[in-house]
């Protein structure tokens, strides 16, 4: 409910980079907490071979799903991609910098560990 003085905003594209703290995200959930959580740890590092630092969005796991008993199950995933490709004159093969993330998915309900 926006009240009588507020007008809705309409758009064809919305970029929301605030994550769980986003007012848009909270509005979409009607105040309910999320069902799940994606925990992420990331880094940005240089020194990679420019000639092979070409591909992005590589998702990889080097572990099987681990059963943690009453604490649920766990599996880590990795994602990596080169930084700066496509900006200005940066073409593939010119960047030695890579962003890497490790992430896992978890249930937000304490009684349903994941």
Image (cartoon, rainbow, N blue to C red):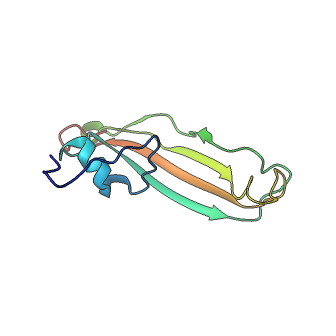
Q: Is residue 77 above or below residue 100?
A: above
Q: Nearest the camera: 89 or 62? A: 89
Q: Is residue 68 visible?
A: yes
- Nearer to me, 76 or 37: 37
Side (left or right) of 102 relative to 31:
right
Question: What residue sits 17% from the left and 47% below the top?
Answer: 31
Q: Residue at x 58, y 40 (%)?
A: 62
Question: x, y (%) of residue 89?
Answer: 82, 59
Residue 64 lies, in percent from the top left, at: 50, 34
Quarter holding residue 5 = bottom left
Residue 2 or residue 82, whichever sits in front = 2
Which residue is found at the position 44% from the left and 47% from the top?
14
Q: Is residue 39 left or right of residue 61?
A: left
Circle count: 0
Please name whichever residue, 68 or 46, is drawn nearer the observer in this view of the structure.
46
Compared across the picture, whether 12 is left or right of 84 comes to left
Q: Position of residue 40 (x, y in %)?
A: 45, 53
Measured along the vertical axis of the image, is residue 4 above or below residue 43?
above
Q: Residue at x 39, y 57 (%)?
A: 18
Q: Is residue 108 visible?
A: no
Image quadrant in which the C terminus is located: top left
Where residue 46 sits: x, y (%)? 72, 65
Residue 67 picture quarter = top left
């Amino acid at each position: 409910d926006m009240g009588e003085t507020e007008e809705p905003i309409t758009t064809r594209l919305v970029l929301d980079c605030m994550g769980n703290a986003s007012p848009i995200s909270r509005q979409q959930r009607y105040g309910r907490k999320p069902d799940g959580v994606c925990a992420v740890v990331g880094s940005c590092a240089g020194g990679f071979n420019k000639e092979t630092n070409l591909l992005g969005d590589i998702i990889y796991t080097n572990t099987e799903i681990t059963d943690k008993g009453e604490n649920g199950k766990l599996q880590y995933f990795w994602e990596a991609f080169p930084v700066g490709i496509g900006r200005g004159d940066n073409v593939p093969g010119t960047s030695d910098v890579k962003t890497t993330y490790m992430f896992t998915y978890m249930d937000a309900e304490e009684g349903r560990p994941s």
